[in-house]
Amino acid sequence: MLSFTWNAPPSIPEVRPQRTHVLLRFYAEGEERTRLTFHHDGWGIGEEWDRAYEYFSRAWPEVVLKRLQYRFDHGPLDWDNPPKLG
């Protein structure tokens, strides 16, 4: 299990100071596979929070979790200059 706080991107400065919570749980499924469950909570109320939620609804599956999988499949990567993933 990995748990940490997270904040909104700089493009949403109104809610950036407030931290949300992320929980990743890893489950071994045989010798070569791991199942991941993901939970992100701690959202506020209002238009800016809606923007942050929408942002992360795309960012987690399309960018961050793909990079995490790439890291485990291929080894360390430069997070400042990551590979382009489809």
Image (cartoon, rainbow, N blue to C red):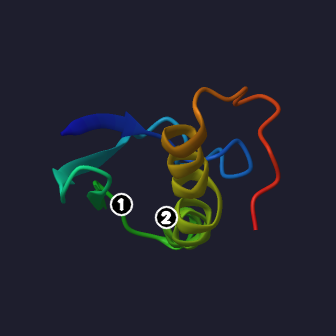
Q: Quadrant of residue 85?
A: bottom right
Task: For marks 2 and 1, give the CA distance.
Answer: 6 Å
Which quarter shows the C terminus?
bottom right
Q: Observer-nearest residue: 19 or 64?
A: 64
Q: Helix, strand or loop at disc 1? A: loop
Q: Which residue is mark 1?
A: 44
- Estimate the x, y position of residue 44 in percent, counting from the top left: 36, 60
Q: Mark 2 vs mark 1: which is more N-terminal?
A: 1
Residue 49 numbered tag: 2
Name the spot of residue 34 as percent of width and height, x first.
Answer: 28, 55
Query: Helix, strand, or loop for circle 2?
Result: helix
Foreground residue, 70 or 20? 70
Image quadrant containing the N terminus: top left
Task: Name above or below for residue 76 compared with residue 54.
Answer: above
- Image point (65%, 44%), residue name: 13
Q: Are marks 2 and 1 in contact (CB under 8 Å)?
A: yes
As rendered, which of 45 and 77 lies closer to the eye? 77
CA neighbours of label 1 inside 10 A, class few (<14), some (14 to 19), many (20+): some
Q: Name the spot of residue 18 as percent of width and height, x first.
A: 42, 40
| Numbered badge on residue 57 | none
Q: Taking 24 as reference, is 61 above or below it?
A: below
Q: Is residue 22 left or right of residue 1?
A: right
Three-letter code for the amino acid on which mark 1 is drawn: Gly
Identified by mark 2, the residue type is Trp
Residue sitting at 77 percent across and 28 percent down?
A: 80
In this picture, residue 70 sits left or right of residue 81: left
